[in-house]
Image (tube, rainbow, N blue to C red):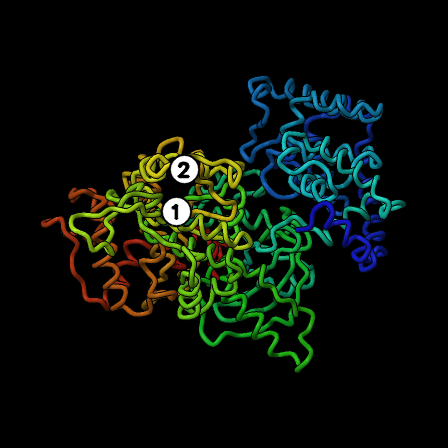
Amino acid sequence: MAEGGDFRSTLAGDIARFDREAARRAADAAEEERRRVLAEFPLEAWAELPLERYALGPASYRDPRHTFCRLLEYGTNAFGSIRGGSAAKHIVYQHRTGEWRIVPSALSRLPVREAWARVRAEFVTAFDAAAAGEYGRIDELDSLSYGQALTTKSLAVYFPGAFLPIFSAAHVRHFTALLGGRPHQESSGARTWRANRELLGLVRRTPEFEGWSPHEVMSFLYAFHDPRPSSRPIWKISPGERAGLWDECRTDGNIRIGWDEVGSLGQYESDRELKDVLDQHWPGSAGGSLRLARQLLAFRDLEPGDRIVANRGKSEVLAVGTVADGYSYAPDVPTHRHVVGVDWDTSFAQTFDSPRHAWQQTLAKVPATLWRDIRARRNESWHSGDTGPEADAASDAELPDSVRKARDLLHHKGQIVLQGPPGTGKTRLALSVALLLAGRGDRIEAAPAERAAALAALSQVPEGGTAAPLTMVTFHPSYGYEDFVEGFKPDLASDGAGLSLQMTDGLFRRVCAAAEKAPQDTFVIVVDEINRGDLPRILGELITLLELDKRGSVSVTLPTSGRRQTVPPNVRIIGTMNSADRSVGHIDAAIRRRFAFLDVPPDPDVLDGEVEGLGLADLLEGLNAKLDVAFGPDHLLGQAYLLSGDRPLATAEQLSHAFHHEIVPLVADYCHGQPDLLKSVLGGLVDDRTGRVVQTNPQDLPRILAEEFVAATAAGEDFPGGEDPGAWGLE
């Protein structure tokens, strides 16, 4: 993204293309919302504002009058959004149980009315300070620091000329750096209202914005320099059982889902908290409720601009939508009360040649390859030369979220470790990041042969070079400093008598030499099983030079050769680490400080297939639920055990081979020869007499696994309380 001088170099052209008239209409709508807040919550009423008129809670959804927090989060989106996340951002809120929760720890032990009185007093002080132009006083109000987005929006409502309608701390700092203010890392300690004021000052010093309203400026910044990632996941969401709510959703411009019993999703601070409530209402879900909890929170946190695919059944796309308005809970509708506003485009309507098994669930991620197919099939329906309103390249949107996260961590730290259970695709992710950094992001989700060819090309050492842009190595107990950095090794070309040794550069020194000669390129070292090596011995004194602020500027003397060594800024290291390996703890603190760590959990979403009626995603979730109980989250199984190449297993024979020859041996190893422990995981598949897993006919195995690992509710049976499948989570 452009920053500083780049922003100003394109500013005139961007302003010429900007629809300022539409921004003015949006500003008028925002002003109407602001006046509504002033009418319902006049500034002079704050000194005596009751808690029940301030806070979010179960009662606030039933009361036709808005509370202050409900109005600011759900009723003033045109003024500026603070939607997403839990109710904790409101500082004080009422939990679904009726319990009042106070976020600041210093107030949490006080009676709730006393705690509210102190929070309210800080709001009043903040408003008085803003009225007097003494903005520095607001920084002294500690309780408000727990709700900085809410506080900044409140200040902007009552003092619209003193703040910009941008309330995300990350967004404010992004735009500040863009306009030439303090870099993001330098302003990270400032509270959001102070950072907002700094951004406003930069806007006022920009001549091109003279005469613009704050909302016009906000609209412009988001239109041309949106800080939100362009590669957000795309979700498939079913509008009710068999799309029974589709006509309503299309007409009303929204998408609605069930699970009404859990109440507003805004009250949950974690997936575990929501899972516990799901378990209370629908017990026996074979562990799938944790995945469901994460999906529901992802629905809650959808942002404007995110994409949604509406479907009917496993094979039909009804439309593709763009989120226009964030999550809200609608208690006034009879069912499916969780709502997100959407602008629908029905030109994407199509039917697949074969069903998508994962689409039997209400919520499912759309893989990048499937999204490309949906777009391609849609574009084929337009006349030649007319690609319709959705003709964008969308390459950024097709970037897998895990790849984006890993890339961002690499930019921030310089080296990362991808850690997770076996089979979660850590090495594949590492190589995908390498492709992206080499400018071959289009090969990440390509056909296997095309992807392999791109990786092979990256791994080729150019003529006269010392290293390829991509270098792979596997660490092991015998791997040492002389292999990675430098050391004396036998000179195989010597024809003299006896053993002749010569100083030889190790892998890392060769990569550094290549990187110094091609500073415009990125050189990636992928270290598989990084924790199996003795890292302090392998890296030696170079561990200090890995820090980004020392790259290219600080050097050390190598003890073996006496040569000076620096680490170029364009070298990146990606390690992979099996979390089930008990040697994980051997990575010492000095190493950990210099690496970022990214968890790579099992991904059932890629298992979009079934074998003889057994959903592979359901199988993986059910098996992992039992492994989690028995051994903890580090000893789960990844999706790779149920894949053949890049595709889910398709036959009973493939499933039987994978289960008996790959999954069972790994689970047995986890159990350390304890039959009772093995039986607690594999249940009836373990023979009571021998303590071993029974051999079954491949054709019978899918049914046996379904009975053992897939709960009745997950299979679409016995919906409690007469719930329909759409409300429970199936199509």
Which numbered tag is attached to residue 542? 2
Q: Position of residue 20 (x, y in %)?
A: 84, 55
Q: Position of residue 261 (x, y in %)?
A: 52, 45
Residue placed at 56% from the left, 28% from the top? Answer: 99
Quadrant of the rendered image containing residue 186: top right
Residue placed at 77% from the left, 49% from the top? Answer: 8
Q: Name the residue nearer the viewer: 431 or 500.
A: 500
Instruction: Give, as a three-letter code, the residue at label 1.
Output: Phe
Quadrant of the rendered image containing residue 464: bottom left
Q: Secondary structure at mark 2?
A: helix
Q: Name the residue nearer the viewer: 283 or 549.
A: 549
Q: Name the residue nearer the viewer: 261 or 605.
A: 605
Q: Is residue 696 left or right of residue 471?
A: left
Q: Is residue 345 above or below residue 299?
A: below
Tell me, yes or no, if residue 626 can be seen here: no
Q: How many marks?
A: 2
Q: Secondary structure at mark 1?
A: helix
Q: Which residue is mark 1?
A: 508
Find out whether the residues at labels 1 and 2 contact each other: C-beta distance under 8 Å. yes
N-terminal of the two: label 1 or label 2?
Answer: 1
Q: Is residue 691 above or below residue 106?
A: below
Q: Is residue 70 above or below residue 450?
A: above
